[in-house]
Amino acid sequence: MKKVLVTYDMFREGFTELVSKYDVVFPEGRDFTYEEVLEMIPEFDVLCSMFDFPVNQELMDKGTRLKLVSNYAVGYNNIDVAYALQKGITVTNTPNPVTDPTADIALGLLLDTARRITECDRKLRTLKKEMKVGVLENLGLPLTKKTLGILGMGRIGKALCKRARACGMEVIYHNRRQLYIEEETKLGVTYVSKEELLAQSDFVSVNAPYTPETYHIIGEDELKQMKRTAILINTARGPLVDEHALVKALQAGTIHGAGLDVFEFGDYPLPELLEMDNVVLIPHIGTQTLETRIEMAEVVCQNVMGFFEGTYPVYKVLRP
Ligand code: GLV
C-alpha cells in the first residue's frame, strides 16, 4: 500500500476515498513541523504539502521513495519545482477550486477600496456621531466605465475579468502569452503591453503566479507609471509587489490606494499600511470558505489517485 504523508492538520472530509485505499498519515492537533517531515519522509511515496510548507532540495533528497508532491494550493512557490522535475518527482496543484473564490475576493477588495466601505465602517464604529457624513463626504470611485488592468490572465484573471465586465468595467490585460482572439472577444478584453496597462488602468490587479520572473512585478518604477488615482489589488502572492515601494508610493500620493490579501513578508503587512485609510488589508482569505477548503482537499487526493491509478485528472505543474 502506498504511503501518503499530509503535513497539515485538517478536517478529514475530502480525504475519505484516499484514506480507504492508501496508508495516509496526518498530524493530530497541529501541523507537522519541517523537522518532523524531514525525519519521516524516507518512508513515504507521496507528500501532501500546504502552500507555505517548504519542499526543498534537502527534503526531496531525503525522500528516497518520493514520487509525488500534491500541493494544497494553486500556487507552488513553496516547492523547488525545477529540482523536483530533475529528480523525476511529479508536482501537482489545485487550480479549479480556488479560481472563483479568489476572483470574488479580488473584486471585493476592488469595490471596497474604491467605495471606501471598510474605511466608512471603521470610522462609524470609532468616531460614531463625530464621523462626517455630508453628501460630499466619503466620496469614492465608481467601477462603471473605469478601466481594470489585469496582470496575469490565467484562470483567476479571467474569472475576475468576467466579474469586472458585469460591473460595467473596461478590462485590459497583460500576460506572458496573448490569448487567442476568440477568447479575447468572448471575455471582452484587450491585450496591451505592461507599460500601457500601468498608464491606462484605474485599477491594477495582480493575478500572476509567484516565480523568479514575477518577483516585484510591481516595484517603484511600475508604481510611478500608474495613475495618481489608481488602486492596486494583490490577491496572488505578496512578493509580486515591492511592499516598501508601495508604502512610499501611497505616502507620496503616487497612487491612490491598495487592496491586499497577501503581504511580502509573511502573514502580516508592513506596519505603515495599517495606518492608512486608503488601504484595505485582509489576511490571505482568497480561498477561505469551507466549500473551497473541502474541494481543494478533494483535488489534492484526486491528484494522488489519478497519478497512481489513472482514475482522475492529474493537475501537474509542468515548469517552475
Ligand atoms: C492560495 O493562495 C492558493 O495558492 O491556492
Image (cartoon, helix red, strand yellow):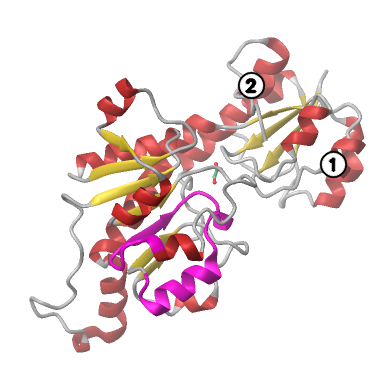
Q: Where is residue 154 in the image (x, y as percent from the top left)?
A: 45, 34
Whether tag 2 and tag 1 are in contact, CB under 8 A, the answer is no
Magenta highlight on residue 280:
no
Which residue is rendered at x = 35% and y = 57% of the image? 109
Q: Position of residue 240 (x, y in %)?
A: 54, 54
Query: Cα distance, mark 2 to mark 1?
Result: 30 Å
Which amino acid lies under the numbered mark 2 shown in the image of this protein?
Glu
What span is in magenta? 225-254
State the residue in front, 161 or 50.
161
Residue 151 sits in quarter = top left
Q: In this view, does 5 lie to the left or right of 277?
A: right
Which residue is rendered at x = 51% and y = 55% of the image? 284
Q: In this view, does 214 lie to the left or right of 224?
A: right
What residue would you read off at disc 1? Answer: 57
Q: Residue furthest top?
A: 310
Magenta highlight on residue 248:
yes
Which residue is rendered at x = 10% and y = 77% of the image? 136
Picture quarter with the N terminus: top right
Nearer to us of marks 2 and 1 is 1
Residue 17 disc label? 2
Quadrant position of ligand 1:
top right
At numbered mark 1, what does the secondary structure look like: helix, strand or loop? helix
Residue 26 sits in quarter = top right
Which residue is rendered at x = 26% and y = 25% of the image? 186
State the residue in front, 94 or 80.
80
At numbered mark 2, what does the secondary structure look like: helix, strand or loop? helix
Is residue 255 positioned above or below 27 on the image?
A: below
Question: Neighbour class for label 1 at 10 Å: few (<14), some, many (≥20)?
Answer: some
